Amino acid sequence: MAAVVGEPTPCQRDLYQSVLAAEERAIACCVPGAEWKQIHLAAAVDMVGGLVDMGVMRGAPESLVEREAHTLFFPHGLGHMVGLGVRDGSGLQPGRTQDPRPCLRTLRIDLPLAADYVVTIEPGLYFIPALLNDPARRERFDDCVNWPLAEQHLHIGGVRIEDNILVTLGAPVNLTSSIPKSW
């Protein structure tokens, strides 16, 4: 259940719904052969779409993700494998070189999913002062963000939703589906 003190603001509700929708779509993509990097980028596009709808970001979501502007609000990878060496048992597919794009350096997985893998899906949107107040980022993404509106929401912190997903030959199985996601 979401940790909420008092009634959520419209902005908090919209952020939560955007993250939840991105999480649900990402979970549905957890099938054998699906490339983790593509699931991550699709979740970024989904959440940026929510920020555009809210007026926080400006532009086409796909273009904003291509420019890496999403990293202002989604600065981490989508998740990691679960099992022995939980956060370290992931990595690159043998023979694959690491993608050089800065927006993908936080990915712990870069391989196609396979049946019986268990992964976390944990998208999030954040208003982090250190990122949003950084002069270099502000200059680089000046036209991508409604800065006055983003500044109004710095107190929110952020929203992150996480589930553990079993990849099967059929539909993905959400191992943590009994955890409520509504208030």
Image (cartoon, grey):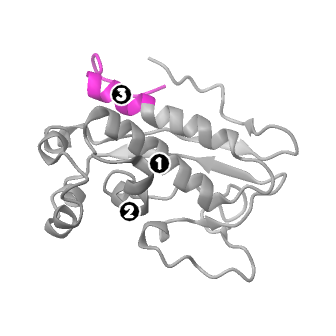
Magenta segment range?
1-17
Residue type (three-letter) at the residue carrying disc 1: Val
> Where does the image place residue 85, in percent across and percent down from the top left?
67, 65
Query: Helix, strand, or loop for circle 3?
Result: helix
Quarter of the image with the C terminus is top left
Q: Which mark is residue 113?
A: none
Q: CA distance from mark 3 to mark 1?
A: 16 Å
For disc 3, the marked residue is 14
Residue type (three-letter) at the residue carrying disc 3: Asp
Q: Alpha-carbon neighbours of circle 2 within 10 Å: few (<14), some, or many (≥20)? A: some
For disc 2, the marked residue is 68
**Left or right of 6: which side holds 89?**
right
Query: Helix, strand, or loop for circle 2?
Result: loop
The quarter holding residue 141 reads bottom left
The residue nearer to you, when weighing 30 against 180, is 30
Residue type (three-letter) at the residue carrying disc 2: Glu
Q: Alpha-carbon neighbours of circle 3 within 10 Å: few (<14), some, or many (≥20)? A: some
